[in-house]
Amino acid sequence: MIVGVGAVSETAGLQATMERIGYDPVNEEELLYQIEEAVTAEPRLCTTSRGVDMHQIITGISLARKDLYWAHKPLFRNLYANHDFNGGSESSVRHRDLHASLRSADHPVECASILTAAFVDKVSAVSGVDVDQIQPSNPLSAYGLDSLVAVELRKWFAKAVGVDIALFDILGSKTITALLSKAVTLIGNNREVETKDGTRVGAIDAIDEVKASMRSLSDEVANITKPANLPMSSFQTRIWFSHNFVADKSFLNLPIISLITGKPVFAYLRQALQEMKKQNEILRTAYCEGEDYPEQIILEDSTAELDFEDFSSQAEPTAALNAYISQIKKQELDIEEGEVMRASLVRLADTEYALVTIFHHISIDRGSSRAYLDQFVPIYDAISSMQELQSIRSPTMSYSDFAVWHNARLLSPSLQPHIRFWKQKFKGAPKAGPLLPFAQAERPPQNDYKRAVHRANIGLPILNRMKRICTTTGTTPFQFLLAAFRSFHYRYTEEKDLTILMIDGNRPHPDLDDMLGFFINMIPIRCSNDCDTSFDHLLTAVKDDVLEAMAHSEVPFDTIVDAIGNEKDSSFFPLGQVVINYQIHGKIPKYSTKDFEIHDLTTEDMPTACELNLEALEDDKGLGFRLEY
């Protein structure tokens, strides 16, 4: 990007757009000097004896951040891997790539010391606790550990260290030292290990192989032969089952509303939607029941429609928007023909808009909303700036690639012990739990998904008090809430054998974090412990139940149901009819284009297929509850 002359100097906003994409500015004098150097440099310093170029002159490479699409290419990988993006630090670990530090360690004790320093820095970054206050002899729960933080730490172990630490190990470790000891054991600093090709190498070298395999899921997927008839993923089959049984299929519609300040250009928005469909097969996929299994069919047509509504002249534009969302949410999407999304631009004021997108849940989950905007905003910017869309990073894998890979993984020998665990765990379990005594209806012959909703909330003082209890008991807020919910249910039913389903939105592989699609799993937690005891004892028992279930959470819910062999009944949800979902929502990142800024992102809840659903949403105001029954 040349500044001071040419297109950048003549086009308002182009420099800001290109800097946001990742280009560094170069002025005319620097460019001319580089050309002069390339022409006049002494040949023997530029080429080998065989005439091969020893160097390349590349200009405009940004080192301001490392999330640029070219940072992982072989030509630039070493440059970015060894650059200090923190801008200086007192810690030696921050100055060096962690993997290089672990490689240089000669003994497990040294390896543990390096890993501890890096991990404490990471915990400090995600928890906001000062580094000096974090003691490795304490449990992570002492610093506000919750499921969201645990997921972030698991990603860090996978990408920075090259080991796969299970969530239940992170959540269940008694101390930080115990957790890191497990990581050091997995690293195996002093041992030789056998790689896939049979050779024996040092374990730190083996980490390279592990990390390479974790980074290259796309390469692994590329080696899998896709069948002619593409299967749905195990997650999608659950939605497909509901889609076929429910009378009003609009209940599976998921609205995602982006609130906009500025003046978006309608034509550019529509073109950006079309490009999103072109780059993401999941947004142009049809679904059907095949001869052997449920199938997905990738369509070539990426045409996108965008409706427009103007509520700016109405007395209450926000109320009109909410009414409009309720109206279009009730319109069924024809997923058998590939209609999985519908979009509208709504004008609320001169510079206030809402982009309302209705998705069928089989194509996307709420966790994909940010990944959607991460793609959508740069595409819009490129279109509005008349850039080539090839400059925008596109997904390396499709959801159908994931489905084929994941289905093959479910048949692998490594998952069989987990499947045997679930079969044994639910041996003799009741097929359905009791209704609460004040339920106003019996179970219908077929689940009609009609539910009532009650909302409540607790403020920050009570939430912080709950977290202090969690700190002293070594538990998480989710485990506390689950124990309280279990106690509530037992009080009215005296049911000693209850299965509660836990919503799990974690992706099966770190490389899938940026993929659009439906990945929601449900982990069944069979609670058969004694409830006629103190809450402290119940909390400890529930914690153990949760950690045990999470240790085997690689198996999707539908695979568990099939393995157990319970006959499906259309009148109630299999295994458990009570579900709990604990979410933590932070502020959305800043999404800006030269025309507008997205300042808020909201979604609407969908009715549950279970009979009792508790959703808890933690934010900076406290803990909000939504009970659906």
Image (cartoon, grey):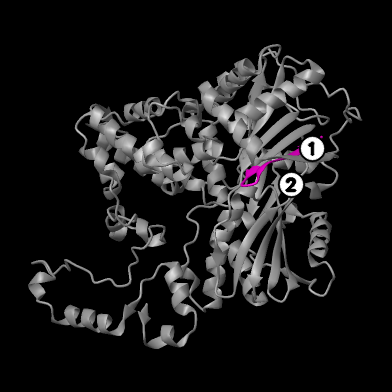
From the top left corner, tell me how far across and down residue 199 is, in percent. 24, 32
Hey, which quadrant is residue 428 in on the image? Answer: top right
Which tag, 1 or 2, sits closer to the chain's start? Answer: 2
Nearest the viewer among 571 and 497 is 497
Disc 1 target residue: 628
Residue type pointed to by label 1? Glu
Point out residue 411 in the picture as x, y percentages from the top left corner: 53, 31
The residue under the point 50% across, 71% down is: 389
Helix, strand or loop status at disc 1 = strand
User: Is there any visible trace of residue 209 in the rendered image?
Assistant: yes
Residue ranking furthest to the front: 461
- The quarter of the image holding the N terminus is bottom left
Q: Does 62 appear above or below 326?
A: below
Callouts 1 and 2 close, C-beta under 8 Å: yes
Query: In the rendered structure, does residue 620 fall within the stretch colored magenta?
Result: yes
**Quarter in which the C terminus is drawn:** top right
The residue under label 2 is 605
Tag 2: residue type?
Answer: Asp
Q: CA distance from mark 1 to mark 2?
A: 10 Å
Left or right of 555 on screen, residue 189: left
The main secondary structure of the magenta stretch is strand
Taking depth in this image into account, of 462 and 550 the one nearest to the observer is 462
Q: Where is residue 253 drawn, in percent x and y? A: 75, 51
Q: Nearer the viewer, residue 144 or 382?
A: 144
Residues in magenta, as a range:
618-629
Q: Is residue 334 located in the magenta-colored stretch of the structure?
A: no
The residue lying at 42 percent from left, 34 percent from top is 164
The circle drawn on residue 308 is: none
SS for tag 2? loop
Q: Quadrant of residue 544?
A: top right
**596 is higher (above) or lower (below) than 121:** below
